[in-house]
Image (cartoon, helix red, strand yellow):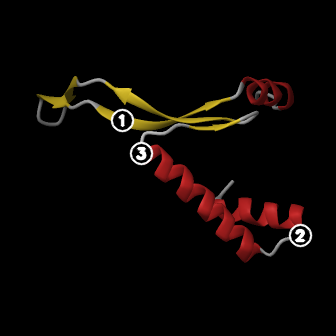
Amino acid sequence: MTKAEIIAAIAKKTGVEKASVAVSVEAFMDVLKNSLIKGEAVYLRGFGSFIIKKRAAKTGRNISKNTTIKIPAHNVPSFKPAKSFVSEVKAKVKVK
């Protein structure tokens, strides 16, 4: 599902214009992104948590040049779904 499809689905479900929904979705994503940039986790009860994970420094390989490279420690955004969300998906989604 794309952002445009999410906006269309929310507009259809709520009866609000797509333009207004688009502004709200963009604002939500902006607040989420800025919170993570500040190092703050975002918790949405019943849905999940957006957190920053710290990756340790490590040694990697450049296979095209056959050399080793050092990959510095860095932070990456991550999503951890809530237990209720996971169990609901497991119950309703069939494995193909």
Q: Which residue is mark 2?
A: 15
Above or below, 39 against 15 in this view is: above
Quadrant placement of the C terminus: top right
Give the distance between the C-alpha atoms of the residues marked 3 and 2, in whole angstroms. 34 Å
Q: Amino acid at mark 3?
A: Lys
Question: Residue 40, position in %: x, y?
Answer: 48, 39
Question: Residue 1, position in %: x, y?
Answer: 69, 53
Say whether disc 1 or disc 2 marks the residue closer to the N-terminus.
2
| Helix, strand or loop for disc 1 | strand
Above or below, 19 against 25 in this view is: below
Of labels 3 and 2, the one closer to you: 3
Give the distance between the C-alpha atoms of the residues marked 3 and 1, in whole angstroms. 12 Å
Q: Amino acid at mark 2?
A: Gly
Q: In percent of the image, x 79 and y 30: which residue is there? A: 89
Question: Residue 15, position in %: x, y?
Answer: 89, 69
Near mark 3 (Cα within 10 A), the count class, few <14, some 14-19 or many ≥20, is few
Q: Are marks 3 and 1 in contact (CB under 8 Å)?
A: no
Foreground residue among 36 and 96: 36
Foreground residue among 50 and 93: 50
Q: In percent of the image, x 11 and y 35: which residue is there? A: 65
| Helix, strand or loop for disc 2 | loop
Residue 44 lies in what quarter of the image?
top right
Say whether disc 3 or disc 2 marks the residue closer to the N-terminus.
2
Q: Which residue is mark 3?
A: 38
Q: In percent of the image, x 34 and y 27: which residue is there? A: 55
Q: Which residue is mark 1?
A: 75
Q: Are marks 1 and 2 in contact (CB under 8 Å)?
A: no
